[in-house]
Amino acid sequence: MNVAKLVEIIGSDFYTGVPDSQLKALCNFLMDKYGIDPKHHIIAANEGNCTALAAGYHLATGKVPVVYMQNSGEGNIINPVASLLNDKVYAIPVIFIIGWRGEPGIHDEPQHIYQGEVTVKLLEDMDIATFVIGKETTEEELSAKMSEFREILSKGKDVAFVIRKGALTDAPKVEYKNDNKMIREEIIKHIVAASREDPIVSTTGKASRELFETRVANDQSHKYDFLTVGSMGHSSSIALGVAINKPEQRIWCIDGDGAVLMHMGSMAVIGANKPKNLIHVVINNGAHETVGGMPTVAADIDLVGVAKACGYPYAVSVDSFEDLDNELNAVKERNELSLIEVKCSIGAREDLGRPTTTALENKQNFMDYLKEI
Protein backbone atom coordinates (compact mmCIF):
# COMPACT_ATOMS: atom_id res chain seq x y z
CA MET A 1 0.00 0.00 0.00
CA ASN A 2 1.47 3.33 -1.08
CA VAL A 3 1.60 5.49 2.05
CA ALA A 4 0.60 8.67 0.20
CA LYS A 5 -2.48 6.85 -1.09
CA LEU A 6 -3.34 5.72 2.44
CA VAL A 7 -3.26 9.31 3.66
CA GLU A 8 -5.27 10.50 0.66
CA ILE A 9 -7.99 7.88 1.15
CA ILE A 10 -8.26 8.58 4.88
CA GLY A 11 -8.65 12.27 4.10
CA SER A 12 -7.73 13.81 7.46
CA ASP A 13 -5.53 16.89 7.78
CA PHE A 14 -4.44 16.32 11.40
CA TYR A 15 -2.21 13.51 12.67
CA THR A 16 -0.78 12.98 16.13
CA GLY A 17 0.98 9.97 17.57
CA VAL A 18 3.99 8.17 18.92
CA PRO A 19 6.41 6.87 16.23
CA ASP A 20 6.69 3.18 15.47
CA SER A 21 9.18 1.33 13.26
CA GLN A 22 6.33 -0.57 11.60
CA LEU A 23 4.80 2.80 10.68
CA LYS A 24 8.09 4.37 9.59
CA ALA A 25 6.75 4.96 6.09
CA LEU A 26 3.83 6.95 7.52
CA CYS A 27 6.02 8.81 10.00
CA ASN A 28 8.48 9.80 7.25
CA PHE A 29 5.64 10.85 4.98
CA LEU A 30 4.18 13.10 7.69
CA MET A 31 7.59 14.56 8.54
CA ASP A 32 8.26 15.23 4.85
CA LYS A 33 4.82 16.76 4.24
CA TYR A 34 4.28 18.68 7.48
CA GLY A 35 7.33 18.39 9.73
CA ILE A 36 6.19 19.22 13.25
CA ASP A 37 3.27 21.58 12.66
CA PRO A 38 0.68 22.08 15.44
CA LYS A 39 -2.04 22.51 12.83
CA HIS A 40 -1.31 19.23 11.06
CA HIS A 41 1.18 16.95 12.87
CA ILE A 42 2.26 16.61 16.51
CA ILE A 43 4.42 13.85 17.99
CA ALA A 44 3.03 13.34 21.48
CA ALA A 45 4.60 12.11 24.72
CA ASN A 46 2.49 8.95 24.91
CA GLU A 47 -0.50 7.38 23.23
CA GLY A 48 -3.04 8.57 25.79
CA ASN A 49 -1.63 12.08 25.36
CA CYS A 50 -2.17 12.02 21.59
CA THR A 51 -5.67 10.54 21.98
CA ALA A 52 -6.69 13.45 24.21
CA LEU A 53 -4.98 15.90 21.86
CA ALA A 54 -6.99 14.43 18.99
CA ALA A 55 -10.16 14.89 21.04
CA GLY A 56 -9.33 18.56 21.51
CA TYR A 57 -8.78 18.91 17.77
CA HIS A 58 -12.24 17.45 17.10
CA LEU A 59 -13.88 19.70 19.69
CA ALA A 60 -12.35 22.78 18.09
CA THR A 61 -12.85 21.86 14.43
CA GLY A 62 -15.59 19.24 14.20
CA LYS A 63 -13.26 17.21 11.97
CA VAL A 64 -11.92 13.68 12.42
CA PRO A 65 -8.28 13.35 13.57
CA VAL A 66 -5.86 10.46 13.14
CA VAL A 67 -3.82 8.92 15.97
CA TYR A 68 -0.89 6.64 15.05
CA MET A 69 1.08 4.35 17.34
CA GLN A 70 2.62 0.95 17.90
CA ASN A 71 0.23 -1.65 19.29
CA SER A 72 2.23 -1.58 22.55
CA GLY A 73 0.52 1.78 23.14
CA GLU A 74 -2.97 0.31 23.24
CA GLY A 75 -2.76 0.12 27.01
CA ASN A 76 -2.20 3.87 27.17
CA ILE A 77 -5.34 4.62 25.14
CA ILE A 78 -7.79 2.39 27.00
CA ASN A 79 -8.75 5.06 29.54
CA PRO A 80 -9.32 7.97 27.13
CA VAL A 81 -11.03 5.70 24.59
CA ALA A 82 -13.40 4.24 27.20
CA SER A 83 -14.08 7.36 29.28
CA LEU A 84 -13.65 10.21 26.77
CA LEU A 85 -14.12 9.13 23.15
CA ASN A 86 -16.74 6.42 23.60
CA ASP A 87 -20.18 7.16 22.16
CA LYS A 88 -21.73 6.58 25.60
CA VAL A 89 -19.66 9.51 26.88
CA TYR A 90 -18.64 12.31 24.45
CA ALA A 91 -18.91 10.39 21.16
CA ILE A 92 -15.66 11.75 19.70
CA PRO A 93 -14.63 10.08 16.42
CA VAL A 94 -10.97 9.19 15.95
CA ILE A 95 -9.15 7.12 13.34
CA PHE A 96 -6.36 5.00 14.84
CA ILE A 97 -3.46 3.68 12.75
CA ILE A 98 -1.68 0.93 14.68
CA GLY A 99 1.53 -0.90 13.83
CA TRP A 100 1.06 -4.61 14.49
CA ARG A 101 4.21 -5.83 16.24
CA GLY A 102 4.13 -9.45 17.32
CA GLU A 103 1.45 -10.49 14.84
CA PRO A 104 0.82 -14.22 15.38
CA GLY A 105 2.94 -16.26 12.99
CA ILE A 106 5.44 -13.43 12.43
CA HIS A 107 8.73 -13.64 14.38
CA ASP A 108 9.24 -10.74 16.76
CA GLU A 109 10.88 -9.83 20.05
CA PRO A 110 9.49 -11.28 23.32
CA GLN A 111 7.95 -8.02 24.52
CA HIS A 112 5.71 -7.97 21.43
CA ILE A 113 4.45 -11.56 21.46
CA TYR A 114 1.48 -11.33 23.85
CA GLN A 115 0.67 -7.77 22.80
CA GLY A 116 0.52 -9.00 19.22
CA GLU A 117 -1.86 -11.79 20.17
CA VAL A 118 -4.38 -9.44 21.79
CA THR A 119 -4.01 -6.40 19.49
CA VAL A 120 -7.23 -6.84 17.51
CA LYS A 121 -9.18 -8.24 20.46
CA LEU A 122 -8.37 -5.18 22.59
CA LEU A 123 -9.65 -2.91 19.85
CA GLU A 124 -12.82 -4.94 19.48
CA ASP A 125 -13.31 -4.92 23.27
CA MET A 126 -13.10 -1.11 23.13
CA ASP A 127 -15.81 -1.11 20.42
CA ILE A 128 -13.37 0.12 17.78
CA ALA A 129 -14.14 -1.19 14.29
CA THR A 130 -10.94 -2.63 12.83
CA PHE A 131 -9.48 -3.31 9.39
CA VAL A 132 -6.12 -5.00 8.85
CA ILE A 133 -3.89 -3.64 6.07
CA GLY A 134 -1.30 -5.98 4.60
CA LYS A 135 0.97 -6.01 1.58
CA GLU A 136 -1.83 -7.41 -0.52
CA THR A 137 -4.45 -4.80 0.42
CA THR A 138 -5.59 -2.83 -2.65
CA GLU A 139 -6.54 0.83 -2.90
CA GLU A 140 -10.05 -0.25 -3.88
CA GLU A 141 -10.40 -2.37 -0.74
CA LEU A 142 -9.14 0.45 1.43
CA SER A 143 -11.45 3.00 -0.20
CA ALA A 144 -14.44 0.72 0.31
CA LYS A 145 -13.54 0.17 3.95
CA MET A 146 -13.02 3.90 4.50
CA SER A 147 -16.52 4.53 3.16
CA GLU A 148 -17.86 2.12 5.76
CA PHE A 149 -15.73 3.74 8.44
CA ARG A 150 -17.10 7.21 7.64
CA GLU A 151 -20.56 5.96 8.51
CA ILE A 152 -19.25 4.65 11.83
CA LEU A 153 -17.33 7.85 12.54
CA SER A 154 -20.43 9.95 11.83
CA LYS A 155 -22.07 8.25 14.82
CA GLY A 156 -19.29 9.32 17.19
CA LYS A 157 -17.54 5.96 17.18
CA ASP A 158 -13.87 5.16 16.57
CA VAL A 159 -12.16 3.02 13.94
CA ALA A 160 -8.70 1.54 13.49
CA PHE A 161 -6.41 0.44 10.69
CA VAL A 162 -3.99 -2.24 11.92
CA ILE A 163 -0.83 -2.26 9.80
CA ARG A 164 1.02 -5.49 9.14
CA LYS A 165 4.78 -5.61 8.74
CA GLY A 166 5.90 -4.19 5.40
CA ALA A 167 2.41 -3.12 4.39
CA LEU A 168 3.21 0.57 3.80
CA THR A 169 5.57 1.50 0.99
CA ASP A 170 7.04 4.37 -1.03
CA ALA A 171 7.97 6.59 1.91
CA PRO A 172 10.13 9.63 1.26
CA LYS A 173 13.63 9.54 2.71
CA VAL A 174 14.00 11.80 5.73
CA GLU A 175 17.31 12.37 7.53
CA TYR A 176 17.17 12.76 11.28
CA LYS A 177 20.21 14.30 12.98
CA ASN A 178 21.34 16.77 15.61
CA ASP A 179 24.56 18.63 16.41
CA ASN A 180 25.55 16.52 19.43
CA LYS A 181 28.85 14.66 19.21
CA MET A 182 28.59 11.90 21.81
CA ILE A 183 27.55 8.43 20.60
CA ARG A 184 25.10 6.53 22.81
CA GLU A 185 26.96 3.22 22.79
CA GLU A 186 30.15 4.99 23.90
CA ILE A 187 28.18 6.80 26.62
CA ILE A 188 26.93 3.42 27.88
CA LYS A 189 30.48 2.07 27.91
CA HIS A 190 31.52 4.96 30.18
CA ILE A 191 28.54 4.31 32.49
CA VAL A 192 29.41 0.61 32.70
CA ALA A 193 33.03 1.46 33.54
CA ALA A 194 31.90 3.79 36.33
CA SER A 195 29.15 1.59 37.74
CA ARG A 196 31.43 -1.45 38.05
CA GLU A 197 29.30 -4.17 39.70
CA ASP A 198 26.34 -1.95 40.63
CA PRO A 199 22.95 -3.07 39.27
CA ILE A 200 21.65 -1.19 36.22
CA VAL A 201 18.07 -0.88 35.00
CA SER A 202 18.07 0.15 31.34
CA THR A 203 15.30 1.49 29.15
CA THR A 204 13.65 -0.12 26.14
CA GLY A 205 15.16 0.01 22.67
CA LYS A 206 18.73 0.33 21.49
CA ALA A 207 20.08 1.45 24.87
CA SER A 208 19.42 -1.99 26.37
CA ARG A 209 20.77 -3.70 23.27
CA GLU A 210 23.97 -1.64 23.50
CA LEU A 211 24.28 -2.36 27.21
CA PHE A 212 23.98 -6.10 26.50
CA GLU A 213 26.66 -5.95 23.81
CA THR A 214 28.92 -3.84 26.02
CA ARG A 215 28.84 -6.63 28.62
CA VAL A 216 29.69 -9.15 25.88
CA ALA A 217 32.61 -7.05 24.66
CA ASN A 218 33.88 -6.68 28.24
CA ASP A 219 33.44 -10.41 28.90
CA GLN A 220 31.18 -9.48 31.82
CA SER A 221 28.11 -11.18 33.22
CA HIS A 222 24.64 -9.91 32.26
CA LYS A 223 23.45 -10.47 35.83
CA TYR A 224 24.10 -6.82 36.72
CA ASP A 225 21.47 -5.53 34.30
CA PHE A 226 17.69 -5.54 34.07
CA LEU A 227 16.86 -4.84 30.43
CA THR A 228 13.43 -3.21 30.18
CA VAL A 229 12.85 -4.51 26.68
CA GLY A 230 9.21 -3.34 26.64
CA SER A 231 7.09 -1.13 28.89
CA MET A 232 8.55 2.12 27.52
CA GLY A 233 8.78 4.92 30.06
CA HIS A 234 8.78 2.72 33.15
CA SER A 235 12.46 1.84 33.67
CA SER A 236 12.99 4.67 36.17
CA SER A 237 10.04 3.44 38.25
CA ILE A 238 11.45 -0.10 38.18
CA ALA A 239 14.78 1.33 39.33
CA LEU A 240 13.02 3.25 42.10
CA GLY A 241 11.35 0.05 43.32
CA VAL A 242 14.72 -1.70 43.40
CA ALA A 243 16.51 1.23 45.06
CA ILE A 244 13.95 1.56 47.86
CA ASN A 245 14.27 -2.12 48.72
CA LYS A 246 18.06 -2.26 48.39
CA PRO A 247 18.92 0.94 50.30
CA GLU A 248 22.58 0.03 50.89
CA GLN A 249 23.23 -0.71 47.21
CA ARG A 250 23.80 1.94 44.57
CA ILE A 251 21.31 1.51 41.66
CA TRP A 252 21.70 3.04 38.20
CA CYS A 253 18.98 3.75 35.66
CA ILE A 254 19.94 4.29 32.01
CA ASP A 255 17.00 6.13 30.50
CA GLY A 256 16.13 7.81 27.20
CA ASP A 257 14.48 11.12 26.44
CA GLY A 258 11.46 9.58 24.68
CA ALA A 259 10.93 7.21 27.61
CA VAL A 260 11.23 10.01 30.18
CA LEU A 261 8.65 12.07 28.30
CA MET A 262 6.26 9.14 28.01
CA HIS A 263 5.68 8.91 31.76
CA MET A 264 7.32 12.00 33.18
CA GLY A 265 5.18 11.84 36.31
CA SER A 266 7.52 9.11 37.54
CA MET A 267 10.19 11.78 38.06
CA ALA A 268 7.93 13.53 40.55
CA VAL A 269 7.48 10.28 42.48
CA ILE A 270 11.24 9.62 42.42
CA GLY A 271 11.93 13.18 43.59
CA ALA A 272 9.38 12.90 46.39
CA ASN A 273 10.97 9.68 47.68
CA LYS A 274 14.56 10.87 47.20
CA PRO A 275 16.35 7.50 47.32
CA LYS A 276 19.96 8.41 48.05
CA ASN A 277 21.22 5.33 46.22
CA LEU A 278 19.58 6.01 42.82
CA ILE A 279 21.48 7.53 39.88
CA HIS A 280 19.22 8.44 36.97
CA VAL A 281 21.11 8.89 33.67
CA VAL A 282 19.02 10.26 30.80
CA ILE A 283 20.63 9.90 27.37
CA ASN A 284 18.98 12.67 25.36
CA ASN A 285 19.23 12.73 21.57
CA GLY A 286 15.90 14.48 21.09
CA ALA A 287 14.63 11.56 19.02
CA HIS A 288 12.66 8.34 18.98
CA GLU A 289 15.79 6.87 17.48
CA THR A 290 15.09 3.19 18.08
CA VAL A 291 12.01 3.32 15.84
CA GLY A 292 13.44 5.55 13.13
CA GLY A 293 14.70 8.87 14.50
CA MET A 294 11.56 11.00 14.56
CA PRO A 295 11.93 13.94 16.97
CA THR A 296 10.84 14.25 20.57
CA VAL A 297 10.36 17.59 22.32
CA ALA A 298 13.15 16.74 24.76
CA ALA A 299 15.76 18.61 22.74
CA ASP A 300 14.00 21.85 23.61
CA ILE A 301 13.15 21.37 27.29
CA ASP A 302 15.19 21.83 30.45
CA LEU A 303 15.38 18.30 31.86
CA VAL A 304 17.71 19.45 34.61
CA GLY A 305 15.17 22.08 35.63
CA VAL A 306 12.39 19.49 35.53
CA ALA A 307 14.38 17.13 37.76
CA LYS A 308 15.13 19.85 40.29
CA ALA A 309 11.49 20.97 40.30
CA CYS A 310 10.51 17.35 40.97
CA GLY A 311 12.79 17.25 44.02
CA TYR A 312 16.03 15.72 42.74
CA PRO A 313 18.71 17.20 45.03
CA TYR A 314 21.26 17.15 42.22
CA ALA A 315 20.85 17.35 38.44
CA VAL A 316 23.31 18.28 35.71
CA SER A 317 23.62 18.18 31.91
CA VAL A 318 26.80 17.20 30.07
CA ASP A 319 27.81 17.19 26.43
CA SER A 320 31.39 15.87 26.50
CA PHE A 321 33.02 12.66 27.69
CA GLU A 322 35.31 14.60 29.99
CA ASP A 323 32.35 16.16 31.78
CA LEU A 324 30.49 12.85 31.76
CA ASP A 325 33.36 11.00 33.42
CA ASN A 326 33.74 13.74 36.02
CA GLU A 327 30.04 13.53 36.88
CA LEU A 328 29.98 9.72 36.93
CA ASN A 329 32.87 9.67 39.38
CA ALA A 330 31.46 12.46 41.53
CA VAL A 331 27.96 11.01 41.72
CA LYS A 332 29.26 7.82 43.34
CA GLU A 333 30.60 9.84 46.26
CA ARG A 334 27.61 12.16 46.60
CA ASN A 335 25.20 9.67 48.22
CA GLU A 336 22.03 11.42 47.12
CA LEU A 337 19.47 11.08 44.34
CA SER A 338 21.04 12.48 41.18
CA LEU A 339 20.18 12.97 37.53
CA ILE A 340 22.75 13.23 34.75
CA GLU A 341 21.43 14.29 31.36
CA VAL A 342 23.81 13.33 28.55
CA LYS A 343 23.41 15.12 25.22
CA CYS A 344 23.72 12.49 22.51
CA SER A 345 23.88 12.19 18.73
CA ILE A 346 21.32 10.25 16.68
CA GLY A 347 22.37 6.91 15.26
CA ALA A 348 23.67 3.43 16.04
CA ARG A 349 25.87 0.94 14.28
CA GLU A 350 24.11 -1.15 11.65
CA ASP A 351 25.20 -4.51 13.06
CA LEU A 352 23.83 -3.87 16.55
CA GLY A 353 22.51 -7.16 17.88
CA ARG A 354 19.78 -8.07 20.31
CA PRO A 355 19.97 -9.81 23.69
CA THR A 356 20.59 -13.53 23.33
CA THR A 357 19.16 -14.36 26.75
CA THR A 358 15.42 -14.63 27.23
CA ALA A 359 13.47 -12.09 29.26
CA LEU A 360 12.84 -14.70 31.96
CA GLU A 361 16.55 -15.56 32.14
CA ASN A 362 17.37 -11.87 32.43
CA LYS A 363 14.88 -11.42 35.27
CA GLN A 364 16.05 -14.47 37.20
CA ASN A 365 19.76 -13.66 36.84
CA PHE A 366 19.14 -10.08 37.98
CA MET A 367 17.05 -11.19 40.98
CA ASP A 368 19.66 -13.75 41.97
CA TYR A 369 22.34 -11.05 41.85
CA LEU A 370 20.25 -8.69 43.98
CA LYS A 371 20.02 -11.44 46.61
CA GLU A 372 23.81 -11.75 46.66
CA ILE A 373 24.59 -8.10 47.32
Image (spheres, rainbow, N blue to C red):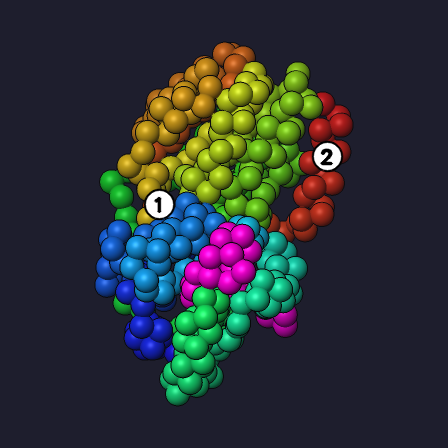
Residue at 51 percent of width and 41 percent of height: 233
Residue at 66 percent of width and 16 percent of height: 248
Please give the range of residues in magenta. 80-106
Residue bearing mark 1 = 296
From the viewer's perspective, is 315 left or right of 173?
Answer: right
Distance between mark 2 and mark 1 Cα atoms = 33 Å
Mark toward the start of the polypeptide (2 vs 1): 1
Residue type (three-letter) at the residue carrying disc 1: Thr
Residue type (three-letter) at the residue carrying disc 2: Met
Q: Position of residue 274 (x, y in %)?
A: 55, 18
Residue bearing mark 2 = 367
Residue at 47 percent of width and 50 percent of height: 48
Q: Residue furthest top?
A: 334
From the viewer's perspective, is 74 left or right of 187?
Answer: right
Look at the image and tell me in which quarter the N terminus lies.
bottom left
Q: Position of residue 255 (x, y in %)?
A: 48, 36
Quadrant in the rendering for residue 125: bottom right
From the viewer's perspective, is 256 left or right of 82?
Answer: left
Q: Position of residue 55 (x, y in %)?
A: 40, 55
Residue at 41 percent of width and 76 percent of height: 150
